[in-house]
Amino acid sequence: MLPGARLVVLGKQGAGKGTQCERLSHHYAVPHVSTGDMLRAVVKEGTPLGLKAKSLIDRGELVSDELIIEMVSVRLAESDVRARGFILDGCPRTVAQAELLVKVLDPIDIDLAIDIDIPTAVVLRRLAARRVCVDCGSNYSTTAPPRIGWTCDVCGGEVVQRPDDTEEAIKRRLELYEKETAPLIEWYRNRRQLATVSGTGAPDAVSRRMIKMVENQRAKKGGRLS
Ligand code: AMP
């Protein structure tokens, strides 16, 4: 049977985390667990919690560590994740979340945290051009739009600019990335769980780099992960 994996994917907004996590999820046949997608689903439900989350997300602020870890711990306890692993996208985003994640996963641990490294000038261009489907979350851009108008090729939903891809929210999200999320790179390096890949170039090339890092880690562990 194809072995699973337990991976955390780090990187600035616009580094291509969503696209790459989707690809790794198919490659290793493990669920893609995206806290951004989970929060957007809560927002869509329009519950009081969803409304509170929406105002934070739209301004580019972070949702509380407690809410995130509660949401993630419920998902990580589900049988598909327990059987094969996960590709964790957008979480942890703070050192406090990383510490809580260790507790949630105990006695197992992640296999590897992969940082997709990319210059800020490139992500600014990508975020300004990014468009997403409001229904299924498929990603497009002004340079690679859907085939027909702004209608999603996958599900027929409307393709729009994310409310947090405005200039002001992007600025705030990148500020918070430097302050809260970038320290995680050192944190995982100190735990000997970090791999860094360049996020520039074609998505296929980036996926290959990431898979190579996972397989290197597997080889180091004698062919097994966790
Ligand atoms: P993303 O789709 O990962 O860019 O997430 C969109 C927004 O959801 C972020 O800008 C945050 O407001 C919120 N969010 C997602 N994941 C987290 C997290 N782990 N911690 C705090 N806020 C988060």
Image: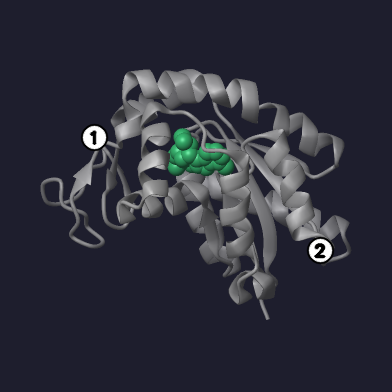
Q: Which residue is mark 1?
A: 142
Residue at 27% x, 56% y: name it. 135
Q: Which residue is mark 2?
A: 226
Horizontal side of residue 208 vs 19, given as left or right: right
Q: CA distance from mark 2 to mark 1?
A: 41 Å
Q: Nearer the viewer, mark 2 or mark 1?
A: 2
Residue at 54% x, 31% y: name it. 12
Residue at 33% x, 19% y: name it. 167
Indicate whether 143 appears above or below 119. below
Horizontal side of residue 43 vs 38, given as left or right: left
Is residue 5 at least partly visible in the picture? yes
For the N terminus, the quadrant is bottom right
Horizontal side of residue 24 vs 167, given as left or right: right
Residue at 81% x, 35% y: name it. 189
Indicate whether 175 appears above or below 142. above
In what element is the residue under mark 2?
loop
Horizontal side of residue 56 vs 148, given as left or right: right
Q: Nearer the viewer, residue 56 or 120?
A: 56
Residue 206 in the image: x percent, y percent? 55, 44
Indicate whether 54 appears above or below 135. above
Indicate whether 17 appears above or below 211. above
In what element is the residue under mark 1?
loop
The amino acid type found where label 2 is placed reads Ser
For the C terminus, the quadrant is bottom right
